Amino acid sequence: MKIITCYKLVPEEQDINIAKDLTLDLSKAAKKINTFDLNAIESAIEFKKLTDVEQITALSVGDKSLENVKLRKDILSRGPDDLLTVVDESFNQLQPHASAQILSAAAKQAGFDLIICGDGSSDLYAQQVGLLMGSMLNVPTINAVSKIIAATQQTITVERALDEVVEVLEIPLPAVISVSADINDPAIPSMKAILGAAKKPAKQLSLTDLEVGELATPVTPISVMAPKQMDRKQIIIDGDDEEQITIFADYLRKSFN
């Protein structure tokens, strides 16, 4: 059985600067592995304990930041057997549909029994890529997976927590699943794993190596801006009797309107 786990590089939040016009300056923001994708990688490693898995491949699409040796070692030290990336400078700000197109083409070329994605990305959090990949690959697809219960060479059984119920679903393979952030706590790689990551194979493709066709652009971003911040009122209410509580509740009520 072969598993592909998808990941994305996103800007480090603390390095993002907000300009006076509320636009985001990412020029000094270092790249890091999307936190939600660490759950997907950990899920792939845990899945390996449930059934016979020959290979776990980490797959990503993006610009040349994917060539960063430190980030590659970080991914591979977390358990995948090899790395597959599709790199092009035009992939700097891909929208979900285009990302899914490229990832699907790469996954189809590599071959897979199960694709595991994170629930979203910390930059866009569109929660679309996994579902779109399943549709493009024409395989069963499910998101918000909160637990992998069992697996065979033909099926995977998962839990999905909804508002008032917990679904238990058996899905035939091949399939695509997106896991929630609370499915596990990603392990911190050991020094041995970090050193061993340098010896694992990494393959890089370009768009011309894949059968993708024209990238679809059903959505065109107009702007990305930080929300307006309200000035602090700095109102201090002294006391805890009924009159002060009423005044406090009144201010709260006004702030929500």
Image (cartoon, rainbow, N blue to C red):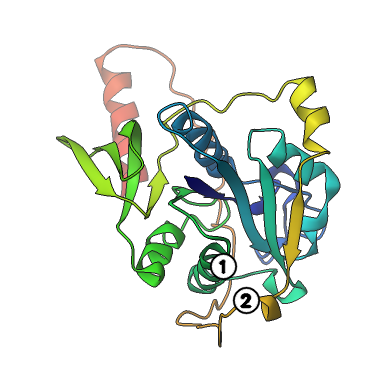
Q: CA distance from mark 2 to mark 1?
A: 8 Å
In this view, 143 is above or below 192? below
Quarter occupied by residue 192? top right
Q: Name the residue located 44 percent from the left edge and 16 percent from the top edge.
A: 238
Location of residue 48 in the rendering, given as x and y in whole percent from the top left corner: 48, 32
Quarter occupied by residue 224? bottom right
Q: For mark 2, what is the residue? A: 210
- Foreground residue, 161 or 133? 133
Q: Residue furthest bottom?
A: 214
Dot 1 alpha-carbon crowd within 10 angstroms: few under 14, some 14 to 19, many 20 or more: few
> Would residue 125 be found to the left or right of residue 135 on screen?
right
- Foreground residue, 128 or 59? 59
Which numbered marker is on residue 109?
A: 1
- Foreground residue, 205 or 144? 205
Mark 2 touches mark 1? (CB < 8 Å):
yes
Location of residue 144 in the rendering, given as x and y in whole percent from the top left corner: 34, 44
Q: Name the residue located 40 percent from the left edge and 28 percent from the top edge.
A: 50
- In the rendered structure, which disc, 2 or 1, sits on the residue that comes first in sequence? 1
Q: Amino acid at mark 2?
A: Leu
Q: Amino acid at mark 1?
A: Gln
